[in-house]
Image (cartoon, rainbow, N blue to C red):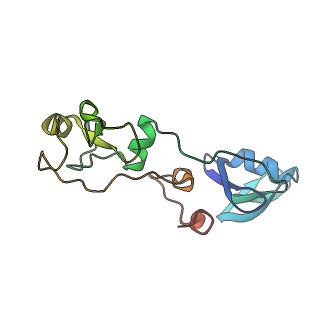
Amino acid sequence: MNSRVLVLNQDSSPLMVCSVQRAFVMVYLNKSELVRPANGHRINSITQSFPMPSVIRLNRYVNAPYKGVSLTRQNVFKRDNFECQYCGTRRDLTLDHMIPSSRGGAHTWTNLVTACKRCNAKKGDFTPEEAQMTLHRKPYKPSYSLFLRDGNNPRTDWDEYLGG
């Protein structure tokens, strides 16, 4: 029972992801309602059986003022699916500034990509065009709902709530 549950705010906007245990307790205590049960899975007590939650909605609105994604090393790796954006490997990963810092390149979502150490050293103090290296995917600022998804185990039952 180490699965994850999508928690929606009262207005059905995605809020967070929590454990099945926490979601079940919130439903049982009437702090939330079950929107979608996990396909065929159940939680059993000695005398009762309950549907395991996959998506729940809170009964009261929670004000979450900031729904942006922090620019961190791990979040850039997650956005780029933990693979080098030049060669596609998943080993020895680091961050690469497309426009090098020494040439005024900013530390922003649109200037940072995941690169392996080999490709980063090959690119050096050049832009990808100058180094004649092509990116697999252009860097972008991700949405909050993208980070609620689990890249390793995508949940298709959450797509309608996360806009996917």
Location of residue 101 by image quarter: top left
Percent across and percent down for residue 159 are 56, 66
* Residue 81 sits above or below residue 10 on the image: above
Left or right relative to 77: residue 34: right
Residue 153 at x, y = what percent? 48, 55
- The reply, left or right, for residue 78 in relation to residue 29 is left
Front residue of 68/27: it is 68
Image coordinates for residue 59, horizontal then vertical, percent: 84, 56
Task: Tell which of 97 and 118 is nearer to you.
Answer: 97
Of 29 and 116, nearer the camera is 116
Q: Residue at 88% across / 49% down in the picture? A: 29
Residue 104 sits above or below residue 15 on the image? above
From the top left corner, tell me how far across and down residue 90 is, in percent.
Answer: 28, 43
Q: Answer left or right for 40 relative to 89.
A: right
Q: Residue at x 37, y 48 (%)?
A: 110
* Quarter where residue 7 is shown: bottom right
Q: Residue at x 38, y 36 (%)?
A: 107
Q: Residue furthest bottom?
A: 160
